[in-house]
Every structure is written in C-alpha cells, then in structure tokens.
Image: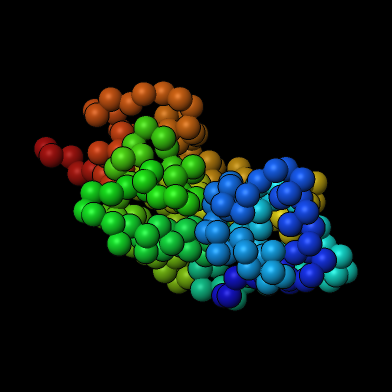
Amino acid sequence: MAQKAIPGSEALARQIRLRRNELGLTIEEAATRAGIGTKTWCRYEAGESIRWDKGRGVCKALNWSSLPDDSGADDRITVEEFRDHKAWSRYLEDVFGPKAAMSFAAGSDILSDHIREDLNELAGMPKGSHIGQLGVSWLKDELPEQFLMNYDYNFLFQMQCVLQAMRGSAGIGTDMVAHSVLEELILYLCNEQAKALLELSLGPEEAEEINCEDWVFDLFGDMDLITFLYSGLYLQPEHPYHFSHWSDMQFYIDSEDPQ
C-alpha cells in the first residue's frame, strides 16, 4: 500500500516557513529536529506534499500538535482502508480486534521505511558504523539507548528481515507470537508508529478513541519490554533483554524434557 500524503499547497508551505522563522530555526536545524534531510524540508517549503509519517517530524520540529489544513479535504486514516493490506493479520483481528490489525499493517509500512533509510545511509559508511553517527535517523531516538553502538548495518538488515517475515506471516493468517526480544521490539515500534499516524490524521482525542495500544502487551503477556529497555535500567550481558540475546528464541517455546 502506498504511503498516504498530506497534499502540498502554497498556504501550507508558507505556514511552515513562517513558523520556522518564528522559532529562529535554520532549514538545517528544522530538518534535524524533524528527522528528515534538508532537501526534503526544502521541498515542503516549496509546497510539495508531505507523507503522513514525515508529518509527525515536521510537527515536532515546529512545536505543532498537528499540521494546519486549509484544504477542507478529508484525508483521514480509517481501519477499513487497511483490510486489503498485505500485512493485515486475521489473527490479530480475531484475537485483539481490527484496530490491532490496522496498527501492525500501517506501522510496519512506516518502520520498514525507517529501517531502509538508515540502511541506505550506512551502506556508504565504513564497516562498523552505527545509526548514532547518522545526521538523521528516526531509529536512533526510538531504539533502546544503551545499545546504540550495536545498531549497525548488519543489525538493521536482520531487523528488516525479521519484520518482513512477520509481515508475511500476518498476511497468511498465521498466529502472531513474539518469540524473541527483537520480535517484541518490532511489534512495539510498529504500534508506536501507527499511534503517531492516527494522531496526525485524526487529532489526539479522536486517535485515542480508535487506538488499541494494549493489544501489544496483551500479546506479550507482560510489559517486560518497557520495564527493561525503556525505563533507564542498565542491563548486564547475562540479562535476557540484553542486546546479545535479542535474537534468542526465549518466549512461548515448547521445550522437550531431556529425560
């Protein structure tokens, strides 16, 4: 499914430019805040359309709750338009409801794009470079901070492969179960992107009504991901949520009795 976009216009471009000047930001500073390249920001100020997932960054850079819209067009995100998405999960729909299925479908599109963007940047850098060295990276702010220097080309390629496998499983109706920390992390990040997309499309209050955040942690059966990776804890190498164990199949795995 193609990414939806906010139609560009001279009025929107002018408001973006005026707001940037009002905040005293250069184009480079605004683009960095938004997590996009300077050329992309220049296109927005020239009146080109803004992809929904990029609109979140523009709002962040300009301290806006949403992008101003003078077009009167109704370009709102709805659950129904994602039912034919190749990553629509009948399992998530049946067990957690259609909002959960939409969250994974929409969020996985955006996450895949973010991974691909960083892969393209790292491909032109020396071996061992990581996303902390990139001028612009959405993943840099969203992945657990402790392991920043481990997020190199090899890891992102693995992450992309795991994501695509999960999208494929979703599309054929396979049960979606997170067996590893990496799979938990991917599901969590997909849902976070879907939440941001809904807020930008509908506004915070309406997005809260349609959002179904709890499905992720219901699927996991706990909130260990947040407790161990996003709560400021320092993890030792032997901890199951340490980066060295992210690919280990730890959860919901049947073990045979050696006896």
Compared to residue 7, the image places residue 132 above or below, namely: above
Left of 236 or right of it: where is 222? right
Give residue 160's quadrant in the image.
Answer: bottom left
**Residue 32: x %, y % from top left:** 55, 49
Question: In this orientation, does residue 251 appear?
Answer: no
**Going 48% across and 63% down the picture, which residue do you hit?**
113
**Going 69% across and 64% down the picture, which residue do you hit?**
45
**Going 42% across and 69% down the picture, which residue do you hit?**
168
Counting the numbered discs, the total is 0
The quarter of the rendered structure image containing the C terminus is top left
Compared to residue 6, the image places residue 209 above or below, namely: above
Left of 130 or right of it: where is 134? right
The quarter of the rendered structure image containing the N terminus is bottom right
Q: Nearer the viewer, residue 94 or 109?
A: 109
**Residue 9: x %, y % from top left:** 78, 71
Give residue 172's quadrant in the image.
Answer: bottom left
Q: How is the image coloured?
A: rainbow
Compared to residue 71, the image places residue 31 above or below, namely: above
**Going 33% across and 57% down the picture, which residue do you hit?**
122
**Residue 198: x %, y % from top left:** 69, 55
